[in-house]
Amino acid sequence: MSKLKPIPLVPIPTSCFDENHLPSVLHQPDPMTPEAERQARRRTCRFIEEAGQRSLRLPRVAVATATVFFHRFYAKHAFQEHDRFEVAMACLLLAGKTEESPKKLDFVIRECWTLRRKAQLQQQQQQQNKLTSGDDSPNMGGMSPNNAAMGIPSPSSGGDFQMKTDEFVKLKERVLLLERVILHTIGFELSIDHPFKFLIDCAQGLTKKRLLEYTNPTKKEKLVGKDGQPLGKSQQNAQLVQELAQNAMNFANDSLHTSLCLQFSAQQIAMACVYLSGKYSGIGPIGGKTWLDLLDGISVEELTSISVQILELVQPNNRRGAVDSEVAFKAIRKDLDEMAKDNRVDAADGSGSTQPDAKRQKVN
């Protein structure tokens, strides 16, 4: 699949958030590139998601809160200074307490370590496969952790992580210390807004007002009930809001793997996710209106910036299907480009402005 090309017509608003000035990028003597910094965030966010939902069985909101804590922490600290997986453990521990789903420290460390070790073993096997296939320079993508720094047995040792060893005690102390450092870093701001509630309210509000419809005639023809008869208006509306909200929720989950929570408000991210969901699902405004007419409080520049960052994350993985997903994503990029053109025409006529309604804000 070809790599997405940036949209040249859309001016991204000036923001106080700049990847080139993140601590990890400015760190000396071993600075990271912005791309490497993004990859480190994404990989660790996947770890937080996996550990939080499957291993620790935390609610979705608690996992999202842990991810935001992680992003805010590394907006002030460098990856070179703190082990990102230990920070992830501390974020999960703190988020569980914040969202009233506390987990014991021993349990958090044991489950996170087990998950990490399983991933290490899989990567070690992949490395061996590459070596046996003739590739003598396998790319581990920065995923191989420093076991000595974490104070845990290496995957090749085959040893278990004993709960009463000195290594475990030291790891507990480091995680508890990091929890306090995280609290000071985020200024003890524990109340986190997430896009989930806002996108549900947005999707339900638009459908209740009958402002949306399926734009694909073929899809309309497939809206039939169990008896094979066409669905009524109320049933079609219920299916529309369910599909719109579910896909928007998926995009919101994807957004947590980016630094969007440092750039935009939860409401703006939610609106962009609803827009992406609508375009992906073949749902659009009625009566010749545009999505910007329906989404109050977000500019075309902000909508574009959020959408492009999410698309750059999800399209390479292509997790939502093969050809259909690629076609849908290309259509979204084209639509964003056309909205930018219209916005510039309005500005030239004096009926609009190229400046965003609200600037992106970096979360302290």
Image (cartoon, rainbow, N blue to C red):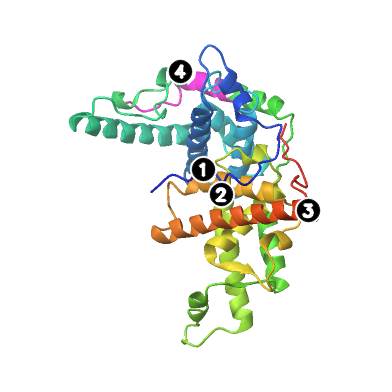
Q: In the image, what residue occupies the spot 51% across and 43% down?
A: 49
Q: Which of pointers 1 and 2 lies earlier in the amino acid sequence?
A: 1
The residue singled out by tag 4 in the image is: 149
Visible residue check, residue 160: yes
Which amino acid, mark 4?
Ala
Q: How crowded is mark 4: few (under 14 residues within 10 Å), some or many (20 or more)?
A: few
Q: In the image, what residue occupies the spot 72% across and 31% down?
A: 364
Give percent across and percent down for residue 289: 69, 68
Visible residue check, residue 97: no
Nearer the camera: disc 1 or disc 2: 2
Q: Which image quadrant for residue 76? A: top right
Q: In the image, what residue occupies the spot 77% across and 44% down?
A: 358
The residue singled out by tag 1 in the image is: 49
Q: Which image quadrant for residue 28? A: top right
Q: In the image, what residue occupies the spot 71% across and 72% down?
A: 208
Q: Which of pointers 1 and 3 lies earlier in the amino acid sequence?
A: 1
The residue singled out by tag 3 in the image is: 352
Q: What element carries label 3?
A: loop
Which amino acid, mark 3?
Gly
Residues tagged 1 and 2 counted as in contact (Cβ below 8 A)? yes
Question: Residue 253, labelled with which disc?
Answer: 2
Give percent across and percent down for residue 199: 66, 57
Residue stretch in magenta: 159-175
Residues tagged 1 and 3 counted as in contact (Cβ below 8 A)? no
Q: What element carries label 1?
A: helix
Q: Is residue 167 magenta?
A: yes
Q: Residues within 10 Å of mark 2 (few under 14, many from 20)?
A: some
Q: Is 61 positioned to the left or the right of 316 in the image? A: right
| Label 4 to label 2: alpha-carbon separation | 31 Å
Give percent across and percent down for residue 134: 19, 29
